[in-house]
Image: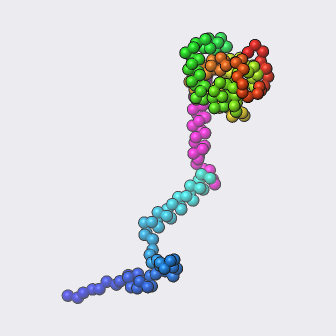
Amino acid sequence: MSETKSEPSAAATKSDEELLMDHEYDGIQEYDNPLPKWWVWIFWGSVVWGAAYYVVYHVTQSAPGVIAEYDAEAKKAGASAPKLAAVSEEALEKAMGDSAGVASGKAVYALRCAACHGDKGQGLVGPNLTDKHWVHGGGKLGDIYKVVAEGVPAKGMPAWDKQLTPAELTSVVAFVGTLRGKMEAGKAPEGKEAPGN
């Protein structure tokens, strides 16, 4: 029987001294070991994937990006969302007479509005709600409802109609209506004076 000897690999024939790399740090040298093939394939696959993604979504824009998809979904949802029913001045006056509703509105106000308008409506970043001056509208409940529902984006006030239920919206407007004319010390008057408030 003849024995066949397998050829040793090139790395196995090199001595430890030959495998050591030239650089040294604190007396430590490292071996010149090749990266595993699976790691190299994953690395190059990631590079190719990243380049393709960049070309498709940013250069040619042949597929919609996540922002475009979000905008399309938001537009579709906005078109199907029910519009807020107009609330009459009389209905809001009636809501002001409901003590439970006003208390509920006070809780909503404390959670959502007090950070800008103050805990008593005296005004902080937002205007004072207790004086007789109004920046938007004439201080009527319908005007307040419109500002709260639609917001004032230029001034940083969000549109609360998408974040509050119709009942919460009505109750917070009723609560703000009870603040009119209380003249709390706070932010200086802004806007036009509204007679009869």
Q: Which residue shows up at 58% across the image and 25% down it?
A: 108
Q: Which residue shows up at 63% across the image and 32% down it?
A: 115
Q: Position of residue 76 (x, y in %)?
A: 58, 33
Q: Is residue 108 left or right of residue 143?
A: left
Q: Position of residue 10 (x, y in %)?
A: 40, 83
The extreme bottom residue here reads 2
The extreme front residue here reads 185
* Extent of the magenta region: 59-86
- Please state, as top left, top right, bottom left or bottom right, where the C terminus lies in the image: top right
Relative height, residue 113 to residue 43 (above, below): above
Asked which quadrant contains residue 109, the reply is top right
Asked which quadrant contains residue 147, the reply is top right
Q: Per the image, is 171 magenta?
A: no
- The foreground one among 86 and 117 is 117
- The foreground one among 4 and 162 is 162
Q: Which residue shows up at 45% across the image and 85% down it?
A: 18
Asked which quadrant contains residue 74, the reply is top right
- The foreground one among 78 and 1 is 78
Relative height, residue 31 to residue 111 (above, below): below
- The foreground one among 180 and 89 is 180
Q: Position of residue 30 (x, y in %)?
A: 46, 77
